Image (tube, coloured by chain):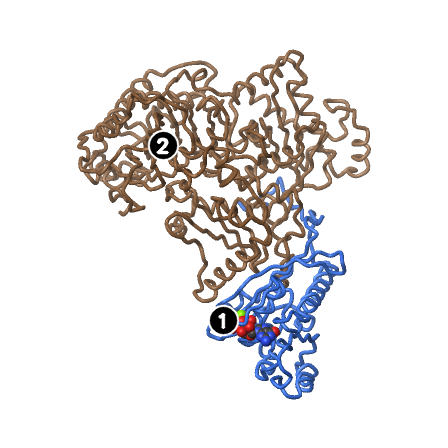
Amino acid sequence: MSELSPSPSRNGETSNHIKYNVSFSSTSKLAVPSIANPTLPTGEPTTAINLENAGPSESSFILEEDDHHLQVVSTSRHSVASDSSYPGSGGQDSEYEEEDGNNVNSSHIEEEALQNMLSDLIRSNRSYVNVRDNSLPLRELSFLDLNIFPNTHEAKNELEFYEKHIQIQKDNDEPAFHQKLKHFFILSTAGKPIFSMHGSDDLIMGYMGIITTIVCTFEESMKEDFKSIMVGDKTKIVVLNKSPLLLVAISQISYELMSSNTDSTSSNKEDKESDSDDILLINQLNTLYKYLLAILSKPTIEKNFHNRMNYDLRKVLTPLDFQNLEALCMKLTYGLPLLNQGESISDTESFDFFIGELMDSSIQSVKVTNTTRMKLNNILLSCKRLKLRDDDSALNRSSETASLIFNRTTKEAEKYLGDDLLFSFLLASSNKILNYMKPKNHSLSNEDMKLLFSMISAAEYQNRGGSFDEDLWIPLCLPNFNPNGFLYVFVKKISLSSYLQSSTVDQYLTIVLVSSNKNTFFQMRELSRFIINKIVKREQFLTTLTDELTGSTKLSILNDIKVPAIKHFIYKLKETNQFIMNDMVHFNNDRSMNTLLQLVYFYSILHNSRATRIKSKLKSTYNQQQGSNFVNPINTYKIDNKKLTYVKWQGAGSIVTGFMLSDNSFEFYCLSNEEIDSKELISSSLKIIRWCEKYRKRLFLGGGVVF
Amino acid sequence: MSGRKKTLLKVIILGDSGVGKTSLMQQFVNNKFSHQYKATIGADFLTKEISIDGNKQVTLQIWDTAGQERFQSLGVAFYRGADCCVLCYDVTNEKSLNNLTSWKDEFLVQSNVSNPQDFPFIIIGNKIDVDEAKKIPSLQKKLQNITNNQLGGLNYPVFETSAKDGINVEAAFEVIAKMALQQEELNDANGNDVSDDYNDAINIHLESESSGCAC
Ligand SMILES: Nc1nc2c(ncn2[C@@H]2O[C@H](COP(=O)(O)OP(=O)(O)OP(=O)(O)O)[C@@H](O)[C@H]2O)c(=O)[nH]1
Ligand SMILES: [Mg+2]
């Protein structure tokens, strides 16, 4: 039961960064937790969080029943099959506002319980709650204050720090190379470099040799894979061996070095248990690896290296691939896009990507009403029903060439235009999923989807400033779906506002059609025209859609949910692994690099904080009360696995509170950068959670439509 | 389709301890020479860019190994994926000449190259700057015995160099690069390079249960 032992102060240092992880669990979905005997710990060494020296090291203590710090849970009701009052248990989403009386009641009890719990926690540490010196003026927080990275004090300002330690630099300058906080290398097992995030070939060549030698020596002499090593306590090197390729990450970034929350790792975590501390960097390396698979496919890589280990994979990579790899490195590590000198961040795609990765390959969805989503679903579904020669119906006859080619190539064999259409997506801003259509016996993993969307973003980035006339046709291997072959992706981005007379904002929609047949470009293009036509045909629908998308991409807690105290939140639905969050602009009133890096840091810490589950005692309590024959005890403690994490950063006149609440159905993360007490934090959080629950069908598209 | 014009070649330098492997590499890459002997422990890595026939840019990634047995612990890691191999001896040390064959055999065993007959090797006899008196007596004859030997002879180009005075060093590495490049081009011409074929479409059965996906 090592999980339940108190306070694994893993980094072994005294703390100036405090974190509470409270876990509690109730016996059923509806059970209302209350604190029977909140005897809280007294002797814990705690200090106020101080931004000046808040580093990666932290001591966390975990309150849980085994320590008698917290007693869980006396429940009032025990039936498993009763209502679904708990937020996250799949309430109704209707187009109308309605409140169930029962829900309100039990929600109140729950809210109070949570509030008590949190305030007890905080009260037990008065020193830190009231430490803020109110005489200090609130000045704007800088990511440099957070000691996210070593050496922050050396840089005069954010820009200088970025240029010195973060920005990609490919020249021969060795001291500059060593100042970079993050490195990625991809090389062949023979030691030939394929890609490096920083540094010139000359500069990295020697390191490639050393890495290969170390990895292979482990392999040969110890018959073991080399996985990771800490150099001092500030640098970690992680290697992913995908022979004939080696992928290496070297990080000095505090939020990447903290041990992560094992709870959220992938399904086969049993055998990965020992790697759990490396999982974040390993996942990053996997993402880079999958990029290579996506553009080359596994057999191509293997065939090239077959019988000649000296193969130089760079020969088949294009300059665009190198640029995409660089962009991935920046997105994975910092949530930052590739920026030219003096360029500022123009969209949040890279930040969205980062959060999705952090949330275990979660996909960001777009809020629209059920009606709108259904209409779009139906448009996608009708693509599968379009007869090839049925020219006069919805098909736009403009394309003479296309029809000619159909006549020549398809003969009698194909009856429907969309016969080879496998998956289709409608995306808002090229990375947020609005609609998804799939066949009944196939589906795409979230990882594959993220890869696909990332490719599309990259292609669109390449084409930025260009016209919307371009139709993209990309051969792509989606490795989880099938690592051995290619699918062919048709991408068309349209500006909805260009079809509207009166529109002021730009709103884009991306149509993605994934075909299994290389020769179906014209069919897919025809389908995309059909879809566009259907969407823009009725002005009223188009206006509604445009307005909804605009509102959704600028989701505001203040305006949409009417919660003033919380500035940013993420709500993730576990069932489909999709998330939504509000516009980052509301955190600091800008979308600057400074704000972005702060959010990246806060959410990384919140997400990776260790939260412990409680199982054993609960089970026995429950069984004593219920009799073991009544309910399957295994199911019992699987049901409502609630956890919360609370982190507070303060100093330099600024204060940021982070809060996480999760159970089996959702994860909720939020940040507030003003003074907020536990009561308000809980009630605001629950309000947002309930809002997400209530509009669940608007916020999330579920598993997609099936044809 | 090629992303980069530059070809990268992995070159391995083998030979007894003290024959001047590290010195050759230092002379070639940095134009430096030191009389002091410092045994190589494990391995050393250096790179140099050269142009062949005035137009082809080649980056040589040179892996210098330890001649002393106790510092050799690298094995396959080291030899794997080499594009060419340099076998070195010292013109004043007969034993180092006689050992060339075993260095070559060791390399072929460890590297597991696909066509050992065609693999590019060259031989370098180093330290030709020293007094004639110190050199191996009737060196040319002995050398011929080794290179022309019917059974597993080392029938490779031979260069006599001085890492000290920089004699023939560049010429030798140029030939190394050319040979490796030729081998590489031969490989590519043989159609081993499966670069831009995106034809591995997946057989998808939308109706049946058989699955094209592994999920
Ligand atoms: N006169 C002369 N001395 C040389 C020459 N090349 C190397 N030496 C000397 O020979 C000694 C050994 O040279 P290294 O290059 O260290 O030998 P090595 O083959 O790398 O030896 P290990 O690392 O032990 O395998 C040094 O003292 C060098 O100065 C040469 O061309 N002429
Ligand atoms: Mg040496």
The residue carrying mark 2 is A662
Residue A108 lies, in percent from the top left, at 29, 19
Camera-side residue: A366 or A148?
A148
Which chain is painted in brown? A
Q: Is mark 1 within 8 Å of ligand 1?
A: yes
Q: What chain does mark 2 sit on?
A: A
Q: Quadrant of residue A9?
A: top left
Residue A256 lies, in percent from the top left, at 42, 42
Q: Nearer the viewer, mark 2 or mark 1?
A: 1
Name the amino acid, label 1. Answer: Ala
Q: What chain does mark 1 sit on?
A: B
Camera-side residue: A587 or A276?
A587
The residue carrying mark 1 is B39
In the rendered view, does A400 fall on the left or right side of A436? right
Q: Quadrant of residue A689?
A: top left
Residue A404 lies, in percent from the top left, at 82, 33
Residue at 55% x, 77% y is: B16
Residue B14 lies, in percent from the top left, at 58, 72
Q: Residues within 10 Å of mark 2 (few under 14, many from 20)?
A: many
Residue A223 higher or lower than A548, as above or below: below
In the rendered view, does B105 fall on the left or right side of A81? right
Secondary structure under the numbered disc 1 in the rendered image: loop
Asked whether residue B210 appears in the rendered view, the answer is no
In the rendered structure, are the residues bearing label 2 and label 1 in contact, judged by CB atoms less than 8 Å apart? no
Asked whether residue A633 appears in the rendered view, the answer is yes
Name the amino acid, label 2. Answer: Ser
Camera-side residue: A570 or A627?
A570
In the rendered view, does B196 fall on the left or right side of A404? left
